Amino acid sequence: MVYNFSIEKAKILDNQDELSHFRNLFDIPKHNNDDSIYFSGNSLGLKLKKQNLYLDQELNDWGKMAVEGHFMAKTPWISYHKNLEGPTSRLVGAKKSEVVTMNGLSVNLHLLLTSFYNPTIEKFKILCEPHLFPSDLYILKSQIELRGFNPEESILFLPSDENGVVDNDEVLRIINNKRNSIALVFIGGVNYYTGQVFDIKKITETCRKNNIIAGFDLAHAAGNIELNLHKWGVDFAAWCSYKYLNSGPGNVSTIFVHENQIKNKPFRLAGWWGHKLKNRFRLENKFSPIESAEGWQLSNAPVFGMSIYRSSLELFDKIGMKNLIKKRIKLSSYLEEAINSINTELDLKLKIITPGNAKTRGGQLSILMDGDGKAFYNFLRKSGVFLDWRDPNIFRLAVAPIYNSFEDIARFHNLVINAFKK
Ligand SMILES: Cc1ncc(COP(=O)(O)O)c(C=O)c1O
């Protein structure tokens, strides 16, 4: 395919695309009265114009009914999280009984590790990727300490190249070779720094053969890549809703627990919202958990946050991940070509470190720049491009197929060419 980065050509591509009209449903931040070029959907997704639809309903019902809203609201609060089970399970290829939405992501990872990290004297190590998100590292270290083990001896980082990219086959080899000491493999489905997509299916299969628990942080994977958590046999996973899923800053997270694990009745920290509904309000002393992922709930469910997530999930359900992924592939390929074209026309040497091609990676491209990358990043930010910088020398751009356009990419390309052309 021959790419051309004129705005006219990009507009034609947008007009031919079946999903392009969904962009109009979003508020796009402005720069000099024009739409900004928003490539930060991997960090915080954009706001749907109608995102207050369900939130307003809950605020109104609260005003009108107060405490009665728990049972009498149009969408009763007592079971509000159940409205999210369908769309969240379809998003990640799960059964409804395997997902529940609650808390923030880091809190949920702690709850899941409490259930699924069960070290013994021989088998106590956690295998994870080198550029683990800092919160995940703090979580792992504190969980290891909680069990009386030493984090320095218990965390095993996968080897990588100089940019943090891991050889996918090497992951499987290490799991096989170190099976006697590894209790848990805990990996980000898509690494936040490099954008690398890990082979969740093969990692999980290899873990299962070796009696190792496979858990994933899907913060950068949910709403971005194809997931089949139930079929792949993933033991547990969690993700936040505010990146590709556009539910707003710090909003709620969803967990997945495989039904085979639910049946095993693992230890879990208990709270009243995880107690069976039929006698929850008798306030008895014995905790009797719901026999689904719901049993991991602790607190009264956060209805306002979930109501915002719900509007956004409806859109994902309507479009479907398959269609979003098709569009993501086209946008990602166009962005890669735009970067190649910039490298050909200018002397910038932008190197994409994200492994794979447009089909095998997600929406994010992590780019390493020879020379003063920070100055280039600062120029882009001042020019209305949203992207982010990660020390020491990486910037990250992500396309979100639900609102990004070919025109965004052509404008980015032309902005750089015009600014740096001698
Ligand atoms: C990969 C990853 N894990 C965990 C977190 C922490 O999420 P939260 O602050 O919602 O707990 C983030 C946040 O950006 C993240 O990117």
Image (cartoon, rainbow, N blue to C red):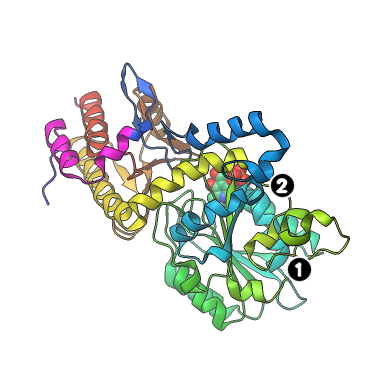
Disc 1 element: loop
In terms of depth relative to the viewer, which is nearer, 36 or 346? 36
Residue drawn at 34 percent across, 43 percent down: 402
Specify whether residue 353 is in view: no
Q: In this view, does 76 lie to the left or right of 326?
A: right
Q: Which amino acid does label 2 sit on?
A: Asn
Distance CA(mark 2)–CA(mark 1): 20 Å
Q: Residue 28 carries which label?
A: none
Q: Looking at the picture, tell me which residue is in the foreground, 344 or 262.
A: 262
Pick the front one: 88 or 416: 88
SS of the residue under disc 2: loop
Question: Vertical placement of 208 versus 54: above or below?
Answer: below
- In the rendering, at what x and y percent does residue 352 appear? 33, 48
Whether residue 262 appears in magenta in the rendering, the answer is no
Of the image marks 2 and 1, the number of the one nearer the N terminus: 1
The tally of labels here is: 2
Reading the image, the residue beneath label 2 is: 300
Q: State the residue at coordinates (36%, 22%).
A: 30
Residue drawn where x is 35% and y is 40% of the image: 370
State if disc 1 and disc 2 touch (CB < 8 Å): no
Label 1 CB-ligand 1 distance < 8 A = no
Amino acid at dot 1: Phe
* Picture coordinates of residue 272, whole percent (x, y): 78, 54
The residue that label 1 is drawn on is 267
Q: Within 10 angstroms of label 2, few (less than 14), some, or many (20 or more) residues? A: few
Q: Position of residue 151 (x, y in %)?
A: 72, 60
Residue 252 in sight: yes
Give the overall secondary structure of the magenta segment.
helix
8 within the magenta span? yes
